[in-house]
Image (cartoon, rainbow, N blue to C red):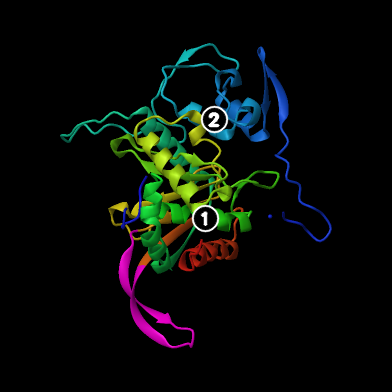
């Protein structure tokens, strides 16, 4: 797992309570299999003439989700079966929505074939950019209290075979803030914003030339700092050793990515659909900043600072809501306490 530079809504209206049930789905018979399809998934299947019997469902009760269809379309294969057509040979290797680009023939070079993972990443990223009107907001965080806590507890965690990385603190701050900002921990649907009861945090793990993968820590809001650190260690290790299970990468409601491992200060990461936001952490640097004491006196001090880059889906999250969420993450980190 990438680490930072040191180690690296119950929402109610005045008259009505907002319903929290999942959007209604419609039962559809296809062949010998009865599949429950949401209107959006049904539309995607119709547009691409896909047979739902051929698509593994990862939703509740095996229901086919939008991401299942996207991954099926992105997966490289020589043959595909539609609802009304027999098996036909695929005529192009380009990804859905991506314009085919001819291989240059007038310049010397080498063609590096796309892997299955790279094709899926390309299709997923392109779809995300086309789906969400994105907004970026950036805030700077003083990590002094976090680092002090880490220094005081790292050895104790090590005795329990847990590596206390800064990622655990970012995850903990996110889990706490997301509980209070339910519209951020949600998914956009045509019927409304579906908010999740649990905070399932995805963490982007770089796999070198193999691309990246996003394992998920389920019910992160119920875990202590040590519990989060242990889960991070476990998932990162199994990700790099290709020992993740399918369930380990499903069900994420928000994602954290650390782009600061190579020195990047802040960035504009791409939202992991169908989530509504992603938080990027930059490289930690010691900088001269103005601090104010309890008496209102200003002074210049050298502090370990980190930029937090929060990208959100403007269909669901407004600028004020997004800034309020990020400000709470900032406050939790700057006033860290167990």
Badge 2 element: helix
Give the magenta part as a residue range: 283-304
Q: Which residue is mark 2?
A: 68
Residue occupying image coordinates x 48% and y 53%: 225
Badge 1 element: helix
Q: Which residue is mark 1?
A: 174
Q: Please provide percent x and percent y for residue 293.
A: 45, 83
Residue occupying image coordinates x 40% and y 58%: 153
Viewer-side residue, 163 vs 6: 163
Image quadrant in which the N terminus is located: top left
Q: Is residue 31 visible?
A: yes
- Determine if the magenta segment contains residue 76: no
- Determine if the magenta segment contains residue 287: yes
Q: How many marks?
A: 2
> For residue 131, which numbered disc appears in the image?
none
Residue occupying image coordinates x 29% and y 39%: 208
Q: Please provide percent x and percent y for residue 132.
A: 53, 48
Earlier-in-chain disc, 1 versus 2 = 2
Viewer-side residue, 133 vs 140: 140
Apparent side of residue 67 relative to residue 78 in the rendered image (left or right)? right
Q: Please provide percent x and percent y for residue 93.
A: 38, 26
For residue 161, which quarter of the picture? top left
Q: Is residue 98 visible?
A: no
């Amino acid at each position: 797992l990438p680490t930072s530079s040191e180690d690296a809504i119950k929402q109610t209206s005045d008259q009505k309570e907002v319903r929290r049930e999942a959007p209604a789905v419609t039962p559809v018979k296809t062949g010998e299999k009865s599949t429950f399809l949401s209107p959006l998934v049904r539309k995607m299947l119709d547009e691409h003439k896909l047979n739902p019997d051929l698509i593994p469902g990862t939703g509740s009760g095996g229901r086919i989700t939008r991401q299942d269809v996207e991954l099926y379309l992105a997966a490289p294969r020589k043959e595909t079966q539609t609802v009304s057509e027999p098996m036909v040979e695929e005529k192009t290797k380009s990804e859905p929505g991506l314009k085919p680009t001819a291989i240059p023939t007038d310049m010397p070079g080498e063609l590096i074939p796309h892997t299955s993972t790279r094709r899926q990443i390309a299709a997923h990223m392109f779809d995300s950019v086309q789906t969400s009107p994105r907004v970026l907001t950036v805030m700077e965080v003083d990590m002094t209290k976090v680092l002090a806590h880490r220094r005081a507890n790292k050895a104790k965690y090590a005795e329990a075979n847990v590596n206390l990385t800064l990622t655990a603190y970012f995850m903990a701050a996110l889990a706490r803030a997301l509980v209070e900002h339910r519209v951020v921990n949600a998914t956009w649907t045509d019927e409304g914003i579906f908010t999740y009861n649990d905070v399932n945090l995805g963490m982007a793990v770089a796999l070198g030339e193999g691309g990246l993968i996003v394992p998920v820590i389920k019910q992160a809001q119920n875990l202590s700092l040590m519990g989060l650190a242990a889960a991070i260690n476990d998932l990162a290790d199994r990700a790099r050793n290709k020992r993740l299970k399918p369930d380990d990468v499903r069900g994420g409601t928000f994602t954290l990515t650390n782009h600061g491992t190579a020195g990047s200060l802040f960035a504009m990461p791409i939202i992991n659909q169908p989530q509504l936001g992603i938080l990027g952490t930059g490289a930690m640097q010691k900088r001269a900043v103005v601090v104010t004491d309890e008496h209102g006196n200003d002074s210049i001090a050298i502090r370990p600072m980190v930029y937090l880059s929060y990208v959100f889906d403007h269909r669901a999250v407004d600028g004020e809501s997004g800034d309020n969420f990020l400000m709470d993450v900032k406050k939790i980190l700057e006033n860290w306490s167990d």
